[in-house]
Amino acid sequence: MEDKQSETQQGAPSSALTLDKVREIYSRTYSDEGKPDFSHIYPFYHQNVRFRDSIQVIEGRDKFIEMCDRLARRCSEIYMTVHDVAQNGNIIFLQWTMTTRFRKAPLTPMHGVTKLTLDNDGLIVEHRDHFDLWGDTLDAIPGIGKMYRWVMRTLLG
């Protein structure tokens, strides 16, 4: 009982994560002031969430928030397009394209899939992103992307 009260006091969401809600919150990437911002998703994350992607593993909502805030500060532009959302029990999958611009770099699309695991209260306890960091990043550099793809085909053939 005490955990539920403290979770609610710390900003737990007032509505359940439906597929439409997931599409909505992950598609919105800007604050009302027009700056990259993810703060609207934080209430949907459990205090002890585990986040993992191709470059890092993060434990806890505070560390997750710090990571998202770093990404927002580094990007002059960031857009999320959620293509598909599906649910099986307490697991939600999103297929997405995140397009970013770091400083003066060109807009770079990254394609991926996210697996969200919900607890019994509907909070996200695990967030796992799957994407090809190097392939999508290097594709934005003329000539380098083709060379990278050739090397990968040759090595993994």
Image (cartoon, rainbow, N blue to C red):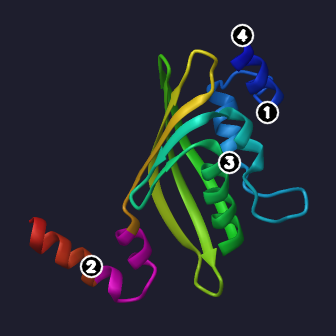
Q: In the depicted view, which residue is nearer to us: 52 or 93?
A: 52
Few, some or many C-alpha atoms within 10 Å of disc 2 (few <14, some 14-19, many ≥20)?
Answer: some
Q: Amino acid at mark 4?
A: Met
Few, some or many C-alpha atoms within 10 Å of disc 4 (few <14, some 14-19, many ≥20)?
Answer: few
Asked if one can make out residue 75 in the rendered structure from this viewpoint, the answer is no
- Circle 3 SS class: helix
How far apart are the alpha carbons under marks 1 and 2? Answer: 45 Å
Q: Position of residue 156 (x, y in %)?
A: 11, 65
Q: Nearer the viewer, mark 1 or mark 3?
A: 1
Whichever of labels 3 and 4 marks the residue nearer the N terminus, that label is 4
Q: Which residues lie in the magenta part? A: 134-146
- Circle 2 SS class: helix
Q: Is residue 15 above or below residue 69?
A: above
Q: Which mark is residue 148?
A: 2
Q: Is residue 156 left or right of residue 141?
A: left
Residue most toward the top?
1
